[in-house]
Every structure is written in C-alpha cells, then in structure tokens.
Image (spheres, helix red, strand yellow):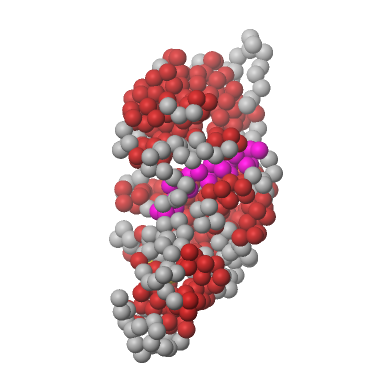
Amino acid sequence: MCIAAATVAAALLPTTGCSADDGGSERTRGAILFHEAGCADCHSLTAAGARARVGPDLDLVQLDVEYVARQVRAGGPGMPAFSDQLTPGQITALASFVSESTSGDSDAGGVEAARFTPDETVVADCSGRGACLEQAFGNIAYRRGPTAALGELSRRSSADERLAADCHRIAHRVAAAALRRNGGDTGRALVSGSTVCASGYYHGIAEQAFAITKDEELPRAARALCSEASALRTTFLAYQCLHGLGHGLMIATGYDLPRALHICDQLRAEWDRTSCTGGVFMENISSSYGIQSRWLREDDPVYPCNAVPSRHKLYCYLIVTSRILPLVGYDFSRAATVCTKTERAWVSTCFESYGRDASGYSVGDATRILELCVYATRHGGSCLYGAARDLVNTDASTGRAAALCRRAPPAHRTTCFEGIGTIVGDLFAADDVRTRACQAVSDADLLVQACLTGAGVPRDDPGSSHGP
C-alpha cells in the first residue's frame, strides 16, 4: 500500500513521493517502510507516528541496527519474517530508521528509563485511551512518585473495568517514569512500588533495566538487578524483583524460554533461581505485549510444564492453570480434571495454581472461591492454600485471606492459614513481627500456629500459647 509522507508523520523529514524506493533520505525511506511493511499496525514508535499496541512498544527500548535487521529478516514470536517481502536494501533502511529512532541519549544514569519524557497530560484528558493513560499516570509517578501514581491507579481501576484491563501495562509505564525520577537507580525505584495491577510495576522495572542490555550481557545484568541492598529489604520485595526479572528476561530474549530459564539458573541461590523462573513462565503464558509464545501448545494445556527439567517445574505448575482455564472456557470443573491428570508429583501444585486463579477470577470473593474449590475435591486444601496466598500477596495484608480461611471446611482450615503464613513470612523479616501478624488472623491457637508454621517462625513449647 502506498503511504504518503504526511500519513507517516507530519514531523518526518520531507519526501517527494509515496514509495519507499522513490529516493529521498534514508531516514525518510525507513519511516515510510515502517508503515508499508505493516510495522505500524503492531508497534508504537513516535518517530514514525505509530501508536499500535499489539507488539512491543519500540519507544520503550534501545535497539542496535543488527538486532533490528535480524528480527525483520527472520521474524520472532508473533512477528512474521520479511525476508521474502523486503529487499536487503529495504531491510537495512528500515533497521537503520528503527535503531536511530530508539537509541537516543538519556539522562537516566545508565538505564534508558523507557525514554519516558514527562509532559502535561493528565488522566482527565484521556477518555479511556491506553497510551494517553500510560503517559498520564507516568506523569504522576515522575512528579509525585510511584506510590502516588499506583495508589491513584488502584483506586480508579477498581471502579473502571476498561482501566482495570489496561492496569498492568499502565503500571509498566509508571515504572519507567519512576526510573527516570530516580536517575535510573533500580533499587530506589523498587522500594517505592506495590503489587497493584498484578505487580506490573515490578515487572516494568525489570523490563526497562534490560531495555539497553546487549544479549551477551544479560546474565551479568540479571545477577546484578536484584542484588541491590534496598531490593532485599524483605523477602516479599526480593521476590517481586526476581519475578519481574523473569518477565524482563523473556521480553529481552525475544520470548526464548530455554534461554531465559538458563539465565535464571545462573543466579546466586536456589530461591532466587526458582523465583525468577516464575516470571519467565508467567510471561510465557500471559505476555505483557499480547505475543503468542511458541512454547505453548493448543493440544496440551499443561505444556511446557510436563517437558521442562525437574528444577523448573515448581513455578511452571504454580502458574499452569492460567494456561488451562482459557483453553477450557474458564470452566473450573474441567480445569480441575486437567489438574488431576497431570504428572502425579505435581497434582497438588496444579491445584495451588487453581486456587490462585480462583481468587483472581472471583476478584477475591470468599464465597465464590469456596464454591470453586469444591471442584478440587480431595485437593481442596491445596486450592484454598493457593487462594489464601494470592489474597495476601495482592493485598500485602492478611484481612481478606483470614476471612476466607475462617470459612473454609474444617478439614482444610489449617492448610489455608498456613498459606497465609507463607506470604506473611515474605512480608516481614523479623519473627516478632511475623508472630503479631499471625496472632491477628485468628483467636484459635491451632490456626495461629498454622500461620506461624507457614511463616517459618520456630514453634514454642508445645504447651505454650501464642496469645498476647
């Protein structure tokens, strides 16, 4: 299709024709090709006047010309190859344009900070438009800090379904603005975040930290990212960083799951490695950019969990029902059946994932969670364990989870409270604080003790009480 220069973008260099082969500057030629080849139908790139939201936002990354040329020639996850559609000269012109347009200088102290530039956009200007909202909430984060931006985002998304649907992506942009505000210091940016919008902020920090990292430097950058002292203030914060790191690695490697897992394997401790894999598997199932990973199979809802090495199975199965449920039309009864037929050693873990998704699907409604966990039959305890963990993780507090567990069937009640404790142990570093948090969830000593067990607090004398 012939694209006139004015259609590409009014601010582009002038051209005298509408074909990319008609001459003119190489930059203008590349800009026109960006539209003619269909790149603008998938990607945002300000220099090309493109605002699509299907594939990765090219304004968020810094790409070298060789990488872009390779992607254009060979394609990648969700992206077709153009070697049969474009000549070598056209690929070179297109790659040069994209590289030049995404590789500006930054004052963000070494991290590109998603090339975030504050402006005067406010939420009231946006009328539900995704890119506008990302900029508006980014402006709040840049000027007032990410805590203010995420708080406002959480408040508004709870009352607006359209905003809630874009919440995760907006939180990514808030992270970009926070990095710019903090001079590219990932540690300082991390401690100012929260888990709203499915932890999109933490995922965004990791994604942007990798945005200008060359492929061969990814393992070193991954090892450094979550080693910041400020990022390790609590296990909870360290986990969010490591989980976000996994998301970032998938994006940075072009959704190469084996390579992303291999980089996770190079982290310093087993807990770090497995936490990182959780982000890898979540990004594989639920891409931040809507990309369909090649590491999924329509005829096998459990894949790749049943194919990866044993060391990677835990977090794959802890997220697996996020893949199963869409394939069965969110029929939880059918999803439960799939869990019962998976690898025997991982059935309970599959039902923990089922409970986590039951919590998310019901928006934390205890009555609905209990109804859905009935389908888990003898694995109901695992379902409630996963649901309780999800509620505490989402809220960073125990209130809703405790209300759920108090209503759980007696046979599963202690397991449910133990699930609460596992996240309490992540949220608080000191045993005395963990103890007080567990004492607040119930008046029953047995249930308090279950919470403490989950939190890793050493058990007192068998005859002692955990009451005040």
Residue 239 quadrant:
top right
Residue 113 quadrant:
bottom right
| Residues rendered magenta in the picture | 270-291
Q: Is residue 49 above or below residue 284?
A: below
Q: Is residue 247 above or below residue 359?
A: below
Please give the name of the residue rendered at 41% of the width and 51% of the height, measured from the top-left corner.
292
Residue 248 visible in the shown view: no
Coordinates of residue 315 in the picture (x, y in percent): 53, 37
Please tell me whether the stretch drawn in magenta is mainly helix, strand or loop.
helix
- Residue furthest to the front in view is 84
Going by the image, does 150 lie left or right of 164?
A: right
Picture quarter with the C terminus: top right
Observer-nearest of 343 and 359? 343
Observer-nearest of 61 and 157? 61
Coordinates of residue 407 in the picture (x, y in percent): 40, 20
Coordinates of residue 151 in the picture (x, y in percent): 45, 49
Going by the image, does 219 lie left or right of 101?
A: right
Observer-nearest of 37 and 233? 37
Picture quarter with the N terminus: bottom left
Is residue 414 in the magenta section?
A: no
Please give the name of the residue rendered at 39% of the width and 78% of the height, measured from the top-left corner.
32
Please give the name of the residue rendered at 57% of the width and 19% of the height, measured from the top-left corner.
449
